[in-house]
Every structure is written in C-alpha cells, then in structure tokens.
Image (cartoon, rainbow, N blue to C red):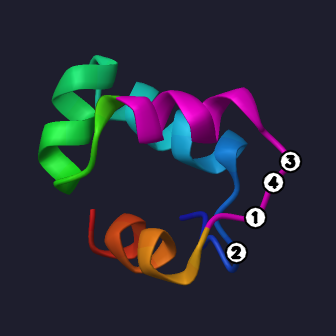
Amino acid sequence: MHVVATWTGQNARALRLALRMTFDDFAGHLGVSTRGVTKWEGQPDAELAMRTQQLLDVA
C-alpha cells in the first residue's frame, strides 16, 4: 500500500487513472470542477491546496 503524504498533480492523476475515471467522472466524485482536475494534472509537481488534499485523502 502506498500512502501519500502530500498530494501533487501527479498523485491526483495516478488516483484518477487507478479509479478508471474520466476527468468529468473524477471531478464529480470529488465534488470539484473538471477544470480544477485538469489544472492539477497540468502541474504534476505542484502541491495541491489543503482542502483538495483532504478530498483526495477521502477518495
């Protein structure tokens, strides 16, 4: 099991792909905009905001 200490765009993309979700499905699952998800993935090394990290922890 891999534990993510700090979520980055790259980690968020890996989770989306592991869940086999489209951008739209993943955004809906998290309750965020599709634009937000594409922004995270467009910045793979960027550390995501704390609220976003909390959403990804739960997912």
Determine whether label 2 and label 1 are within 8 Å by CB.
yes
Residue 29 is left or right of residue 36, and the answer is left
Q: What whole-number distance in Å separates the C-alpha atoms at marks 3 and 4? A: 4 Å
Question: Do callouts 2 and 3 mark residues in contact (Cβ within 8 Å)?
Answer: no
- Marks 3/1 in contact by CB < 8 Å: the verdict is no
Label 1 SS: loop
Q: Position of residue 9 (x, y in %)?
A: 67, 45
Amino acid type at mark 4: Ala
- Magenta part of the chain: 35-48
Other-residue count near label 4 (Cα within 10 Å), few / some / many at <14 / 14–19 / ≥20: few
- How far separated are the C-alphas under marks 2 and 3? 11 Å
Closer to the N terminus: mark 2 or mark 3?
Answer: 2
Answer left or right for 1 relative to 35: right
Looking at the rendered structure, the secondary structure element under dot 4 is loop
Camera-side residue: 48 or 20? 48
Can residue 40 be found in the magenta stretch? yes
In contact (CB < 8 Å): disc 3 and disc 4: yes
- Report how far apart the C-alphas of labels 2 and 4 lie in the structure: 10 Å
Q: Which residue carries the number 4 mark?
A: 46
Q: Which residue lies under the disc numbered 1?
A: 47
Rendered-image quadrant of the C terminus = bottom left
> Which residue is painted at 45% across and 43% down in the image?
15
Which class describes the residues within 10 Å of circle 3: few (<14), some (14-19), or many (20+)?
Answer: few
Amino acid residing under circle 2: Thr
> Element type at marker 2?
loop
User: In the rendered structure, does residue 27 fall within the stretch colored magenta?
Assistant: no
Give the amino acid type for the residue marked by disc 1 in the picture.
Glu
Question: Disc 3 to disc 1, how far (Cα)?
Answer: 7 Å
Report which residue position mark 2 lands on.
6
